[in-house]
Amino acid sequence: MDHKEKDAMIQIRTLYACIFSFIYATSDELENQDTQGTIANYGGGGFVQKLPLTGSTEAQSAIATLKANRWIDRGTRAIIVDFAVYNANINLFCVVKLLFELPASGGVLTTPKLITYNLLTYQGSSGTVLMAFEGVFCGFILFFIFEELFAIARQRLRYLGQFWNLIDVCLLGFSVATIILSYNRTRIATKRVNYVIENGLTNAPFDDVTSADNAFLNIKACAVFIAWVKVFKFISVNKTMSQLSSTLTRSAKDIGGFAVMFAVFFFAFAQFGYLCFGTQIADYSNLYNSVFALLRLILGDFNFAALENCNRFFGPAFFIAYVFFVFFILLNMFLAIINDSYVEVKAELARKKDGEGILDWFMNKVRGLKKRGKRPDAPESEDATYEDYKLMLYRAGYAEKDINEAYTRFNVTMMTDHIPEKVAEDIADEVARVTEQKRSYMENHRDYANLNRRVDQMQESVFNIVDRIENVNATLQNIEKQRVRQHDGGNLMDLSALMNSEIRNRSTNANDKKDE
């Protein structure tokens, strides 16, 4: 076959393939989903031209045929180039979707979208480890389900009245959804990969895989977020962390009421910005963009020049009013709510005894201090010596100093002698009594220190009040002195006026007598 015949065959195949390019195909036939662009969202249906994987001559010929037959006309609003590639070295698929939008005003807007997937997740040793961890996760969720069902059966409606129980239910729901979506993603990906192996990448839509993977990742992200929120339940490692978590819990209702008021003001400004500036500023082109523009303004990302150029009166007025109400009023109100709750929690914790946090409990567990104050059992061995029982007391969590003092009181000198059961009980009672006495003394000392600290705080507050009263008294005395001075000055002025009037009257009378 010479070159002319070969070119003719290519043109015939190309023309035959291009015939179907002018027949509309639905989204179900193409197995495509909607594509989101800059201007609008485009459905999965359309006119499709499949290009060969090998042989650029056939691809160029197909494109030339489409161009000659005006495949792109005035009604075309979007052209999507959709293909997928696979890298066997790193076992990754890359789904590429290039969107070219053709607005009615002219021009082309491009939007590239590249998504990388690991569809063959259970390949190799890492896949085996992943499968094992997923099995452990499924077992834990199954155990968690039975545990919550038993809790619901015991507490019934009271179960829903606790905040952390609702968090557990949400976490359980998202975890079950994650397992289901993971299975669905694996099933769809396996089906699509098998289809690619059988038919090649010429017609391999991956939109269903993309949708399944996105749903799985979104639900998994929600589950992980709620799991981290649950950490607040066990965050009382020390007093500071307990104060923070208690502050958030106590201020939850006030923050909820504040959120309603903030939403009213915020959406009022967002609606105003959309209606007033939406036709000229892209950040306020719709209500959605207007909301995020105001959120960025809170963070300091704003374009004041655009507002001023759009409307010289409403632009600056809108900016100043928003900053005044949101920054100087609402945000300060939010901080005041948090501050009041923190002060209340801090005062409440100051009135209580220092509790035992998770870290303290763990250290006490390691050191065996939970047995302190309890009399240990007598030695089981009949040949146990005083040294053996001393070691037993020490392991039970008692201080070595207290043990030595008890041995001294019972005149124990030979540590290798056999210890009778009655003596062991007496020594244990003595050590427990001394330990309990010291513990009680330490508690009383701590209570006294707390009370002394509170008295000092009250005394300091009283001194501050006395100083303020003295300052107010001094101010009142100064005001009284000024009032007396003003009154005396007024009397002197009145007396001077009377004297001047009397002098003028006498002078007038004297002049009248002279005239007579």
Image: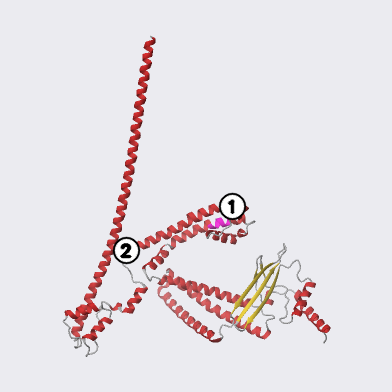
Q: Which residues are magenta?
A: 266-272
Q: Residue at x 58, y 74 (%)?
A: 214
Res 11 → quadrant: bottom right
Q: Residue 94 location, x and y as percent?
A: 63, 78
Camera-nearest residue between 273 and 367: 367
Q: Is there any visible trace of residue 378 in the rendered image?
A: no
Residue neighbourhood size for the residue with mark 1, other residues' Cα within 10 Å, grouped as few (<14), some (14–19), many (≥20): some
Q: Residue 306 location, x and y as percent?
A: 61, 55
Element at label 1: helix
Q: Is residue 347 above or below residue 423?
A: above
For disc 2, the marked residue is 351
Residue furthest out toward the top:
516
Q: Is there any visible trace of residue 284 in the rendered image?
A: yes
Q: Is residue 405 above or below residue 107?
A: below
| Left or right: 418 as drawn, with respect to 508 | left
| Left or right: 415 as drawn, with respect to 37 | left
Q: Residue 380 location, x and y as percent?
A: 24, 88
Where the C terminus falls, by quadrant? top left
| Left or right: 31 as drawn, with respect to 436 | right
Residue furthest out toward the bottom:
383
Q: Residue 513 location, x and y as percent?
A: 36, 11
Q: Residue at x 26, y 64 (%)?
A: 448
Residues under labels 1 and 2: Cα distance? 53 Å
Q: Residue at x 79, y 78 (%)?
A: 15
Camera-nearest residue between 326 and 166: 326
Amino acid carrying mark 1 in the image:
Gly
- Determine which of the numbered discs, if any, sits on residue 315 in the image: 1
Circle nearer the N terminus (1, 2): 1
Res 375 → quadrant: bottom left
Where the N terminus falls, by quadrant? bottom right
As for residue 20 lying within the magenta part, the answer is no
